[in-house]
Amino acid sequence: MKVTLISIPVRDQEKALKFYTEVLGFIIKKDKPLEGGNRWVTLVSPEWQDGPELLLEPGPNHFEPCKIYQDALMKAGMPYTQFDVKSVDAEYERLTKLGVEFSVKPSQMGTWKYAVFNDTCGNNIELVEEL
Amino acid sequence: MTFYEREINRINNIIYSNKEQIESVIGVRNYIDNNYDTDLNLDLISRLRFISKFHLLRLFKKYYGLTPKQYLIYKRIEKSKEQLKNGMSVTKTCFAVGFESLGSFSTLFKAKTGKSPSEFQKEQFSRSKLGSEFRHLETNKNYQDESNTN
């Protein structure tokens, strides 16, 4: 068994695709049509293209509990998932310049540095750097 | 303040309250990051940080979830992957990242990545070659698509 994919719920796949590629910098690995205008879109990091894929899943539009869970996490300021970065400070600088909103500015927790931003698709995402 | 921030602060105060310990282990990890290619061992690191080696071992494991030795191996294997991708020979890579014997390098590499260093390198090369061939095909395809629409 291997872990090759994680999924993230998004309300609008096209908007998410733009944000995750143009702002965050992921690249498209797979993009194929499914039924009802939905797509199977996965992304990878440019520096780790054979690493796990991130699936932009339109779950909240089709399954109410998914929407409720996503809303509850957002309201609590809780990250849906986390991405590893070389420097949280550098990413914070870069992303705020691109208009990304952070609910938690770069902070330290023990041996970790972290920050939390809004992905504009319904999720808080945490950036982490192990110190 | 959100629920998440309150929880993070609460947990932070419980498990990360000892700032001195945290500085120590971060210092050790940085030292390994900067010196993974040298003859590193726990005795040397604990002398540098003025703490007993068993205490250091326990602290490092407590904060990072793995021992300094495991972290060092992880670091060396990650660095060796970069070198192999860049085309460095297996023997050169082994010594460049701090391993002292080709045998232990190959065994550890296989155990951690599932492939021997030379298999890994071959796979990287064929992958990048395939990648460029596909890009070439893709460009032609786009060109044809455009000609069809015109």
Image (cartoon, rainbow, N blue to C red):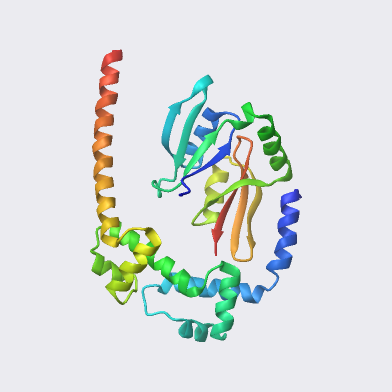
x and y percentages locating residue A100 in the rendered image: 59, 41
Query: Does residue B95 show up?
Result: no
The residue located at (41%, 79%) in the rendering is: B40
x and y percentages locating residue B138 in the rendered image: 28, 30
- Residue B99's quadrant in the figure? bottom left
- Residue B96's quadrant in the figure? bottom left
Q: In terms of depth relative to the viewer, which is nearer, B9 or A100?
A: B9
x and y percentages locating residue A49 in the rendered image: 39, 46
Query: Does residue A88 show up?
Result: yes
For residue B131, side relative to residue A14 (left or right)? left
Residue B82 in the image: above or below residue A38: below
For residue A16, side relative to residue B99 (left or right)? right
Q: In terms of depth relative to the viewer, which is nearer, A121 or B100?
A: B100
x and y percentages locating residue A95 in the rendered image: 54, 45
The residue located at (71%, 57%) in the rendering is: B8
Residue A101 in the image: above or below residue B59: above
The residue located at (73%, 66%) in the rendering is: B13
